[in-house]
Image: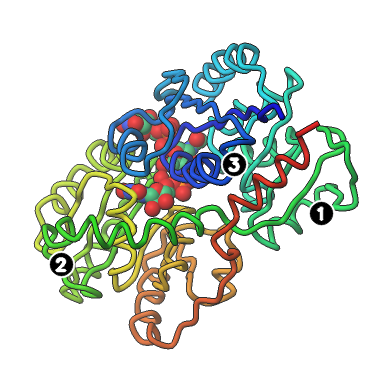
């Protein structure tokens, strides 16, 4: 039987990591049934935001790199659409797989759907209900351009129902008669798969940092609402600095280049203070295996990342999220993620709560059994193999 041809679209760091679960399953169990073509939009291009993951996670190297680079939303999204349309028309895939909520997700969804190629959206139905986030616009539009919508959580599935998607639709599926499907989360697959490898390969990295288990806090910050507003940026980093000093607690901070640029340009005095500080360790972005070790060993995690807050759960660590809201609502309900916005009092309150109650927290399995990629690809074959 002819193989099903899929375009696997990545662009930003978390998408490359997510795609590795699908890539790995195709190379293994589905090698006789699916042909994979990897398209990298080039939205992220620094080695530590892109190549490091292809090398470390042994993902298939991109067959096409559109090299769009950085730019304002319209320009970046437009450039991806223009270039990816050529690839789609040339490759003529049976379907196009997109992940999450970046500009690469939106551009690929629109370009494919307008040329009548079916779209599979992995992480469909995630909603923050805050349309001032670029990601919220991207995910809503990507969902409504898709033929197969893969919801990773019950909450995501319900969000799709309330937007009019119907679970009772039957084959043949199309953009006008889409299939909504609840699975686990492919990032849980990845965290399980790579956790042992991280332990085996990355001990030197931890030793090099000179921090002991549970005696440091991991911090990541990159969300535009935090980096682009000097007041929020300043409130967040001043509070982290204060907490590290009051508690003599090392903070390991692998910072996205966006955050480094913002600190240098928008709050130069604070940048100088945190760059040369006994407890604050600002380092470049780390690889996924390194990140897993940091997440596993941290006392607690402070982040505005979607992926990192979920990984805090996979590795049973409490997490303070520097946003007003989250798409991963089950974590907040569970009490292991606390939303603190960029509010110093709320950040400190969450810190105190976790320090006092950390050992009593529970981390139930919300995200499947680590086999989401296989379930998704079986569904892709069922829907698109004619
Ligand atoms: C993007 C996604 C965001 C996701 C994040 C993952 C959008 C709208 N946002 O945000 O949802 O959480 O990726 O990390 O798609 N830069 C570099 N080197 C790079 C890439 C970017 O220095 O390789 C710098 C540039 O100054 C650039 C800035 O980071 O202007 C922002 O990059 P961009 O891709 O536009 O958005 P992210 O903030 O990375
Ligand atoms: N990550 C990483 N190195 C880092 C920071 C993050 O490997 O220095 C991983 C992290 O473990 C998670 C993903 O990148 O799997 C999250 O990406 P990011 O925070 O950039 O984006 P978001 O998930 O918020 O879209």
How far across and down, in percent of the image, does residue 206 sit? 18, 61
Residue 208 in the figure: left or right of residue 52: left
> Residue at (54%, 14%) from the top-left corner?
83
Label 3 vs label 2, nearer the camera: 3
**Residue 56, position in %: x, y?**
31, 43
Looking at marks 1 and 3 on the same chain, the residue that comes earlier in the sequence is marked by 3
Residue located beneath label 1 in the image:
162
Residue 211 is tagged as 2
Residue 299 coordinates in the image, percent (x, y): 29, 73
Q: Is mark 3 within 8 Å of ligand 2?
A: no
Q: Disc 3 on helix, strand or loop?
A: loop
- Please give the name of the residue rendered at 81% of the width and 31% of the height, measured from the top-left corner: 386
**Which is nearer the eye, 194 or 156?**
194
Q: Is residue 180 left or right of residue 45?
A: right
Colour approach in the figure: rainbow
The quadrant of the image that shows the N terminus is top right
Taking depth in this image into account, of 345 and 75 the one nearest to the observer is 75
Q: Is residue 155 above or below residue 363?
A: above
- Residue at 56% from the left image edge and 32% from the top image edge: 8
Q: Which residue matches tag 3?
A: 30
Residue depicted at 31% across the width and 57% down the height? 197
Mark nearer the viewer, 2 or 1: 2
Please tell me how crowded label 3 is: few (under 14), some (14-19), or many (20+) other residues with Cα within 10 Å.
Answer: some
């Amino acid at each position: 039987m002819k193989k099903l041809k899929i375009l696997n679209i990545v662009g930003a760091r978390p998408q490359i990591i997510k795609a590795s679960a699908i890539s790995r399953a195709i190379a293994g169990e589905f090698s006789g049934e699916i042909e994979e073509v990897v398209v990298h939009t080039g939205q992220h291009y620094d080695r530590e935001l892109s190549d490091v993951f292809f090398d470390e996670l042994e993902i298939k190297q991109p067959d096409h790199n559109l090299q769009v680079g950085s730019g304002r939303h319209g320009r970046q999204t437009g450039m991806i659409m223009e270039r990816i349309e050529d690839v789609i028309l040339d490759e003529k895939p049976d379907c196009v797989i997109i992940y999450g909520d970046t500009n690469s997700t939106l551009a690929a969804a629109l370009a494919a759907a307008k040329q009548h190629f079916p779209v599979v959206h992995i992480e469909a139905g995630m909603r923050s209900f805050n349309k001032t986030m670029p990601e919220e616009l991207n995910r809503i539009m990507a969902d409504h351009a898709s033929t197969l919508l893969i919801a990773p959580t019950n909450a995501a599935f319900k969000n799709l129902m309330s937007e009019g998607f119907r679970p009772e639709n039957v084959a043949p599926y199309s953009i006008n008669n889409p299939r909504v499907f609840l699975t686990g989360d492919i990032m849980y697959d990845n965290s399980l798969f790579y956790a042992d490898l991280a332990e085996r390969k990355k001990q030197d990295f931890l030793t090099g940092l000179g921090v002991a288990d549970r005696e440091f806090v991991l911090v990541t910050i990159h969300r535009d609402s935090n980096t682009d507003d000097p007041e929020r940026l300043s409130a967040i980093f001043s509070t982290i600095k204060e907490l590290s000093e009051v508690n003599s607690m090392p903070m390991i901070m692998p910072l996205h280049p966006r955050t480094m640029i913002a600190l240098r340009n928008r709050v130069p005095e604070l940048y100088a203070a945190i760059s040369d500080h006994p407890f604050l360790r600002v380092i470049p972005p780390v690889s996924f295996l390194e990140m897993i070790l940091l997440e596993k060993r941290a006392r607690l995690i402070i982040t505005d990342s979607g992926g990192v807050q979920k990984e805090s759960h996979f590795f049973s660590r409490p997490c303070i999220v520097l946003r007003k809201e989250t798409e991963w609502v089950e974590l907040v309900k569970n009490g292991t993620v606390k939303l603190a916005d960029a509010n110093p009092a709320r950040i400190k309150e969450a810190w105190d709560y976790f320090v006092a109650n950390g050992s009593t927290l529970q981390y139930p399995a919300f995200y499947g059994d680590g086999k989401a990629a296989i379930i998704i690809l079986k569904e892709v074959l069922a829907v698109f193999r004619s």
